[in-house]
Every structure is written in structure tokens, then in C-alpha cells.
Amino acid sequence: MKDVTKVYDTGEVKVYALAGVDLELYTGELSVLLGPSGSGKSTLLNILGGLDHATTGRVWFRDLELTDLGDRALTRYRRDHVGFVFQFYNLVPSLTARENVQLVTDVAHNPMNPAEALELVGLGHRLDHFPAEMSGGEQQRVAIARAIAKRPEILLCDEPTGALDSTTGVQVLETLRNINERFGTTTVVITHNADIQRMAHRVIRFQDGRINDVTVNETQLAPSEIVW
Ligand code: ADP
């Protein structure tokens, strides 16, 4: 993205959620976005994922300029290329784990089998469980299975461990890292937990709608190797 701004105009005040951001994400990279609450991280992620429009500036996925696309084309971009994981899992309570994943695989071009996606996140033994029968960490792993089942090139995660205790959070982070390593999925993880940065290839720090620091990690730790 090049010189991206996002301005919320609430009538009385203008909020510069993004105040001019240049960022290039690389194929296969796992990057972590760190920064205080309100610094613009979610806004950036939503623009990257085609959920929201920039006010000014330009955004590309490879040769596709997202900032040129209308809503239908953006929907196609999201469907074909992007997986999302949010803090709250957004599973359908009346559907089993397998059926929740199937909602996505039914409309994807070259999806995994739902059971295969659930195996990958360590839930091969929970295929027919309903969300209420699973722990928070398991539900989040169902949400990850749902996000990866269409084999997206990009996986965008907004505070994926925000609602979990630290042990469960580590399992979820291990899952994300395994997916990144195994499939080369370009992964962006928003967090305000500074410890998570040690598993990333690159750490991007936000402040007041701007990137104020970028660090490349020479070595990445597995989440289970990090002292939390
Ligand atoms: P972060 O993810 O770093 O917590 P956000 O991207 O959610 O930050 O928000 C950046 C800024 O934009 C904040 O000041 C927030 O209050 C403001 N903001 C976000 N969404 C809206 C909205 N829909 N309307 C008005 N202001 C918003």
C-alpha cells in the first residue's frame, strides 16, 4: 500500500485512523502488527482484506489494484484470496465444526475437505462437535480451519488470542505459525501482546495512524519456546 489514509468524519471531528501508510508485505511472510489501542491496526487490516476502503492512497494485491475495485470485485477478491480470523470466533452455533467450515468450502474454488482443514488445526477428533461443546481455543481453531480451508494466499488475524488465556493462546499461535510454514500463507497478526512479536518474520509498530518502526527478526521462535 502506498500513502494510505483513512479518515472518519463524524461531523464535528475528523479522526485520522491512518495518516499516510506505506507498507509492502511479502509472500510467505508472517508479520505482526503491534501498537496501542486506537493506533489504526484494525483499520489497516480491514483495508488489506478488502473489508473497507481507504480514503486516499493506493492498495494492491500483486497486480490487482484494490483501490480501483467496486464492491462486487472486492467481494470476489476476499472470497478467492483472503482468510480472516477475528478475536471472537463468529461460528454459527447451530452448526458443527465440520459444517461451519463447510459454509466456506461450499463456495470456494479449490478448497480442502473440511475434515482435512480441521485435522490441520488439531481438531480431527472434534468434527461433529457444536461450538458450545468446545473450549475457546478449540472454537478459535475451528475459525482458523474455516479461514484456511479455501487455501487463501493471505491470512489476516485481528487479535486472535485476545479472548483466550495464555496457554490456549499459545496453541492458537502455534496453529497459525504451522499454517504459515506449511503452506507459505502470507500472514498478518494484530496484537497488543509484545511477546508475540518473537514468532514473526517482521514486526511493524503503529502509533497514531502511522508506522513508526519496522523490525526484521533474524530468528523466529515457536510460540511454545517463548517465555510469556
Ligand atoms: P486499533 O486496531 O489499533 O485499536 P483502529 O483501527 O480500530 O485501531 O482505530 C483507529 C482509530 O479510528 C481510532 O481512533 C478509532 O476510534 C477510529 N475509528 C475506527 N473505526 C471508526 C468508525 N467506524 N468511526 C469513527 N472512528 C473510527
Image (spheres, grey):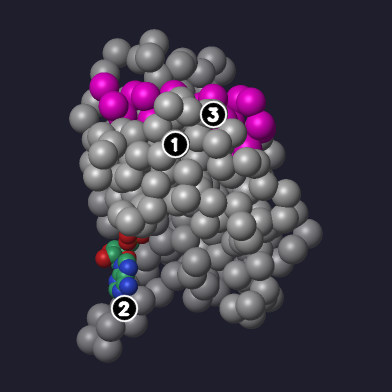
Q: Which residue is mark 3?
A: 120
Q: Nearer the viewer, residue 195 or 206?
A: 195
Residue 98 visible to the viewer: yes
Amino acid on which the number 1 mark rests in the picture: Leu
Marks 3/1: CA distance? Answer: 12 Å
Q: Which residues are magenta?
A: 167-187
Q: Residues within 10 Å of mark 2 (few under 14, many from 20)?
A: few
Q: Which residue matches tag 2?
A: 14
Helix, strand or loop: magenta stretch: helix
Residue at position x 61%, y 25% in the image: 181
Neighbor class of circle 1 (other Cα within 10 Å; few <14, some 14-19, many 20+) is some
x%, y% of residue 40?
37, 57
Residue in front for this viewpoint, 97 or 152 = 97
> Whole-Å distance between the Cαs marked 2 and 1?
47 Å
Residue visible at 27% across and 88% down? 11
Q: In the shown orientation, is residue 13 left or right of residue 30?
A: left
Residue identifier under label 1: 127
Q: Name the one closer to the observer, 216 or 153.
A: 153
First along the sequence among labels 2 and 1: 2
Which residue type carries mark 2? Answer: Lys
